Image (cartoon, grey):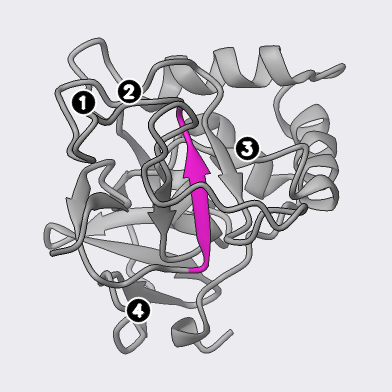
Amino acid sequence: MPLQNRVLPTGKIVADPARGLFTGNRGIIHRPDGTLGTSRWSHKHWLVCTLDHPRGVYHGPMPDRGWTALFFLDEAVALTAGHRPCHYCRRDAYHAFRHAWSSGVADGADRMAMDTALHKSRVTRRREQIRHQADMAALPDGTFVLLNDVPHLVHGDSTWPYATSGYGAATPRPTGMVTVLTPRPAVAVLHAGYRPALHPSAGL
C-alpha cells in the first residue's frame, strides 16, 4: 500500500502509487509507522528537492529522524502547494527563483523572508489552502486554477487538467475571473519569469 505522501495542487496529501518528478520537505510530520498525523508541517521552510540526493544518500521514504519525503507531479504543483526550490540540491533553480522573487515580490530576498511570506500566503492556521480570485487573462504560465472543481495548469492559450499520474488533454484557456490555487507570491515569481519544470504529460 502506498504511503500518504503525494501532494496535490489543492494542498491535500494523499496516498498514491505515482511518484512524480520531485520530492519535498516540510520537516518531520509522520509517525514511526510512516503514517501522517494531523500536522502538515513542522517548520516554514517548504522545499522542492530532487528525487536523488546530491551525495547519493538514501534514508528511506519516511526516515525516523530525518524528514518526511513528500512527492509532486512536477514543480508547478509544488509551487502551488506552497514550496520553493531547495538551495542545496537545486541551487540553479533556487537562484533563478530568488532572482524572480526580487523582481516580482521584493528586493533583497533571502530564504527566511521568502519562506515567511510564502507561509502567510499558502495556508491558514486550520491547515486550509489560501486561494484567491484573479482574471484569467492576467495569470502567468505555471499557475494552477480551479475549473469545475478540478485543478488545471495554465500555459499559453490552454489549460491542462491535473491527475496524479499526469495531465489530461489540453482545453482552451477560459476567460473571466477564476479561483487561483497558486499562492500570490509564487504567481508574482512566475510573472517575473521563473519557469517551473513541468511533467512531460503537459506536452510542453
Mark 1 — residue? Answer: 128
Q: Please, what is the three-letter code of the amino acid marked with disc 1?
A: Glu
Judged left or right of residue 178, residue 101 is: right
Element type at marker 1?
A: loop
Q: Are marks 4 and 2 in contact (CB under 8 Å)?
A: no
Judged left or right of residue 42, residue 99 is: right
Mark 2 — residue? Answer: 123
Q: Is residue 134 magenta?
A: no
Mark 4 — residue? Answer: 166
What is the spatial separation of the Cα atoms under label 4 and label 2, in whole angstroms? 25 Å
Write down the quadrant of residue 185 in the picture.
top right
N-terminal of the pair, mark 2 or mark 3, is: 2
Report the magenta residues as a range: 21-26
N-terminal of the pair, mark 4 or mark 3, is: 4
Q: Please, what is the three-letter code of the amino acid marked with disc 2?
A: Val
Dot 1 crowding, Cα within 10 Å, few <14, some 14–19, many 20+: few
Q: Are marks 1 and 4 in contact (CB under 8 Å)?
A: no
Query: Which numbered mark, 2 or 3, is in the foreground of this view?
Result: 2
Dot 4 crowding, Cα within 10 Å, few <14, some 14–19, many 20+: some
What is the spatial separation of the Cα atoms under label 1 and label 4, in whole angstroms? 24 Å
Residue 48: image x %, image y %? 58, 46
N-terminal of the pair, mark 2 or mark 1, is: 2
Q: Please, what is the three-letter code of the amino acid marked with disc 4?
A: Gly
What is the spatial separation of the Cα atoms under label 1 and label 3, in whole angstroms? 21 Å
What is the spatial separation of the Cα atoms under label 2 and label 1, in whole angstroms? 5 Å
Element type at marker 4?
A: loop
